[in-house]
Amino acid sequence: MSCGFFHKKAPGMKSSKLDCGAMQISVKWILLKTALVVIGVFTISAPECAAREWFVSPDGTAGGDGTKERPWSLEAALKPHPMIAPMDTVWVRKGIYSGGFVGRLKGAPGKPVVLRAYPGERVVLDGRGAPGSSVLRIEGEWAWYWGLEVTNSDPRRDTNQADAQGVSYRGTGIEMFGTDIKVINCVVHDTGVGVGMAVSSRDQELYGVILYNNGWRNGDVRSGHSIYAQNQHGEKIIRDVILFSPYWFNMHIYGSRQAFLNNFVLEGNVGFNGRWLVGGEGPMKNIIMKDNLLYGNSAQLNYRNRPNEQLKLEGNYLPGATSALYWDRMEVRNNTFVRPDQQGERISVSFWTQDGFEKSVFEGNTYYVIDPRVHVLRLGRVDGPEVTDYTLERLQKDLGFEKTGKLVVTPQGRPPEAAVFVRRNLYEPSRGHIVIYNWPKKDEVEVDISAMNPQLGDRWVLRNVQNYFDEFISGVYDGKPLRVRMTGWTAALPVGEDKPLYPVTFPEFGVFVLTLEKGGGLKTAPAADPARAGVGAPGALLMTELPENFFQGVAVAGAAPFGRELEGVRVHFTDGEGGQWWTRLALIDRQKVVWEAPPECGLGLARVRLIREGEPEVDAGVVLIEAAAPGLFTIDGSGTGDVLGWVRYRDGTMEGLAECGPAGCQARSVDGTQAVELGLMGSGFGSSSDVWVRIGGVAADVRGVERAEYPGVEWVRVGWPSGMEAGWTVLRAGAGDKAANHAGVSVK
């Protein structure tokens, strides 16, 4: 392909120049060509050190070579074995691994080592026989631990038992001490504390983990939490975690006056049958609690600590009393507050600054009450012990808050209809969480799983998390909502106990894990984030799998002005409102076709069809078109690692963040002392006005989103924050409540 395609300079942007025959090509267009490399138009030789796969099994040895035939022991792999390099995957085969383990796997910035349960196999780490020790202590850096079951099968639960002398407590399931560590889609049960996140570590993520029955007791006194976390530097993310039925607290973000409780993001978690505490003895800072779903427990966002700074509550569903005390200010938006059958206030707040309440935001929240005279908010001030109770009407009239707030009066102060939430897994798109608040207590509830982008003929399995390994229903997707029964489910007994810690929450409340197994259909995914199948946005660049033998030619890229046909292939798109379009095509090869979702298309489930001249049309399934489906292009094309883009410096020069050659693509570091602006290569941002970017946890100034001439590609322009430390820096971006894939940038 000639460089003649890259012929325009983006308006208003300075650029360095590269001679290409008689043509001057801007940095931006060189980067667009790099994007074509990433999504598969051009072929470049792979780096010499390609990522490798290694294997571990219960009968493996330190003397093995890490192959399927001669696997390592788990201890040998975790040391780590000297053969394991950044970007490698260590597959752990099924079986029970007994004892306490220490993981010291070490990747590199943007190039993690992944230790993962082999697909479809149950891998159990059992701490029995190692009393007081963690089942898995994670040190090292840039490592992901994925799909493991972590437990302790020792039946001695009561430390007062005669045969339990010397057993002070059950060891922690997973202790996270390393930096840039992720624990993904694991199940942790029947340990002491389920997961501990150390204050000294930074930039950790706990994602998709299921925690239950963790803790111990001394006679009638219970101890042990689902999660115990602290943080000083960087950011700790707890997202899409299901935590329930601990011996003491579910969420326990707590510490003494010497501890730190800074920079926590709690998003999309489900907590029930256990207390939810964010607070301790020392002050807290920068706490975000978003889209969490609670049941049977209150949210306590305070303890003795003060002064606390910057609390954000958004989109949470909170049946129970919520308290947030001793803050300087807070944003409370679009939450649902419910206290079934109770008259008390829905949320209590207080401030340690005189003007804290005036600087705060309360907007768009929904309050379910028995009587319109019920107080929905209790306000305490720093200048005295007095509190003031407010009805919604008084909040609106006297204080000017909650102009779009909503009061719903029902006979029992609870919603009259079921509330159903479906959250798709970011790391395993065929997996998701389903949460059902069955307020009417019906025997069955219909669940629309279209957000999971199921295809006709897909096999589905729905597991009850309260008895995760033993209770499930299954079927084949027929295009209709699932009918989920809300009776007949049970709860797993804690190891060493003769009855559950809590009664089952059915029929009023149920939580399930849904998995889909492909039975037919083709996958459509954002080109910037191929792992996130089934979603898109108007104007986004998407890629669709091709059936076998559908296209047998060589890879071909489109050229400006980008037509609706490539090599006789066209993509037909019917949007959720019935509008029909022929899409602009970017490229085609034997595996995929890359195309642009029509910028003016409607939202909802869209149907994709593939048409090739002289051949029957192919139904390529559906894709969910949302207002935004942001994605960032990364150097390796996987949607993780170093971001593609450009940097502009104080002297007006501009250079790309990546350089590609025969040996592959390499990241180029940003001079953090001279940078003034970044341009991030993305897709799916332009349909939203609420674009945000955080670099190293610091909110960056978003200066605009510009569409590139290449279909579906956008430049997200942001100011460079001052004070960035050298090293690989986490970069998060999104549009509204939609976050893009994980990426980063190297800083020098």
Image: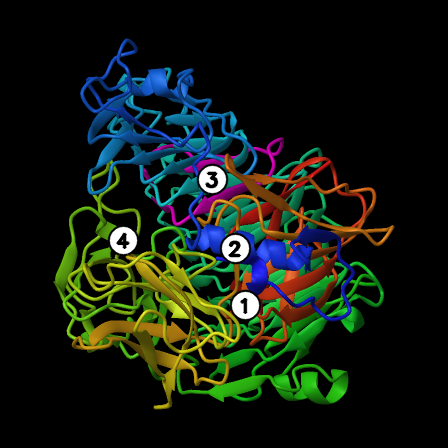
- Residue 455 horizontal/vertical position (percent): 22, 69
- Magenta region, residue range: 187-211
**Contact check, label 4 and label 1, Cβ < 8 Å:** no
Which tag is nearer the camera, tag 3 or tag 2?
Answer: 2
Which residue bears the numbered disc 1?
710
Q: Is residue 343 above or below residue 498?
A: below
Distance between mark 2 and mark 4 Cα atoms: 41 Å
Q: Do the numbered discs 3 and 2 sit on residues whose CB atoms are within 8 Å?
A: no
Identity of the residue furthest to the top in this view: 63
Looking at this view, is 331 or 250 the one in front? 331
Front of the two marks 4 and 1 = 1
The numbered dot on residue 35 is: 2
Q: Is mark 3 on a helix, strand or loop?
A: strand
Q: Can residue 464 be seen in this view?
A: yes
The answer to whether the residues at label 1 and label 3 have Cβ atoms under 8 Å apart is: no
* Marks 1 and 3, the one that precedes in the sequence: 3
Drawn side of residue 526 relative to residue 719, left or right:
left
Which residue occupies 32% across, 60% down?
592
Residue kind at label 2, given as amino acid type: Ala
Q: Name the residue under label 4.
A: 465
Secondary-structure class at tag 4: helix
